[in-house]
Amino acid sequence: MNKLENAREKINEIDKKIAGLFEARMDAVKDVIAYKQENDLPVFDGNRERTLIERNRKMIQNPDYLSMYEDFLQFMLTQSKAYQKSLIAQDVIAYSGIKGAFAHMISEKIFEGNPKLAFNSFEEVIDAVVDHKVEFGVIPFENTNSGLVGEVLDLLYQKPVYIVKVADLKVDQCLLGLPEASLKDIEWVYSKDQALMQSREFLESLGVKSVPYPNTALAAQYVAREQDKTKAAIGARENAALYNLKVLASHIEETATNTTRFLVVAASPNTQKKDHLAMIFTTSDEVGALSKVINRIAEHGINMDTLQSRPIKERPFEYFFYVQCTGNLEEENLSSLMKSMEDVVSNVKILGTYEILEKQ
């Protein structure tokens, strides 16, 4: 065996030891994060990281290797932090609003027993998914009365997330006031803009002023805090018990079939084939491009049940299209569809295949 072969054999033996030590180190990292979570300790400690680097660099005897070792150590610490983040995010569900919001209610129904994290906006929910702070995000997407939530559609276009489940929630909008209030006392009504829109006829019959609020549960919380019997909120019946309010009227939405569709989004798509597909695309600057896309979808045995256009904010008077489909969603057929669309779309994003859960 020559010098080269000897050196390579030595490297192989060292690599085997490094692999074993790396696994042992990551197992220890897992134990550390478990202890910190159990004892409510901060997850990341900058001082500990600096101390570790300073201590370990002193172990290197050959100064030629010092900077390389520091890079190696920093990379290993980065991997440890990424692993800790993934452990923290595991099974955690993000939603927009506070306890009592419709998004919280549907999250509890879909992911009963999972830890939940509340965020202030739809974008914060999606960013938490993208950054692997949570495993799934639950966001409202469409209502049978008020239509699609444009902000969420924009975020699906902009952010690298995938739809993995869809769930429908029957919405019973209630007017909530203070325990001593009656309908004739109400002058101001607070709620999410979609809830106000869904209850427009009822509010007009009362002759009250409508005030948009970030979400229904926050509106109920605000009314409870103000202690002003001229103020009321529109929201779920559950909010009355949560915030010590009274249901002044129920089923105030314009249609008895009022239902909101929620999306469950993740940082990775489903790996198993599901019954529904969503995609977003922009068409090329060609006459009849959209018509050609629709025809090619049909030619592949795929039924398009939703087509929605939406302005691209950063490009005035240009639009992207959102499509929901059912039918032949086998991987080979989808690949063929994507290839057939190349000459008529300038950009396409598969949002994933998903199942629609039974109405909650």
Image (cartoon, rainbow, N blue to C red):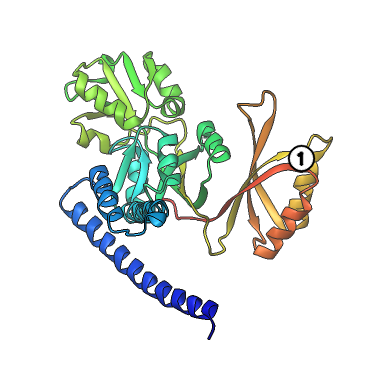
Q: Nearer the viewer, residue 87 or 177?
A: 87
Q: Is residue 106 left or right of residue 288?
A: left
Where's residue 135, x and y in %? 39, 52
Is residue 333 something that shows in the picture? yes
The residue depicted at 50 percent of the width and 54 percent of the height is 268
Picture quadrant where residue 198 is located: top left
Is residue 174 something that shows in the picture? no
Where's residue 335, x and y in %? 70, 59
Q: Which residue is mark 1?
A: 290
Q: Amino acid at mark 1?
A: Leu
Question: Is 196 placed above or below 67 here?
Answer: above
Picture quadrant where residue 241 is located: top left
- Toward the right, the furthest residue is 287
Question: Is 125 placed above or below 55 here?
Answer: above
Where's residue 305, x and y in %? 64, 47
Q: Nearer the viewer, residue 131 or 186?
A: 131
Q: Helix, strand or loop at disc 1?
A: helix
Where's residue 287, x and y in %? 84, 35
Q: Nearer the viewer, residue 24 or 168?
A: 24
Picture quadrant where residue 153 is located: top right
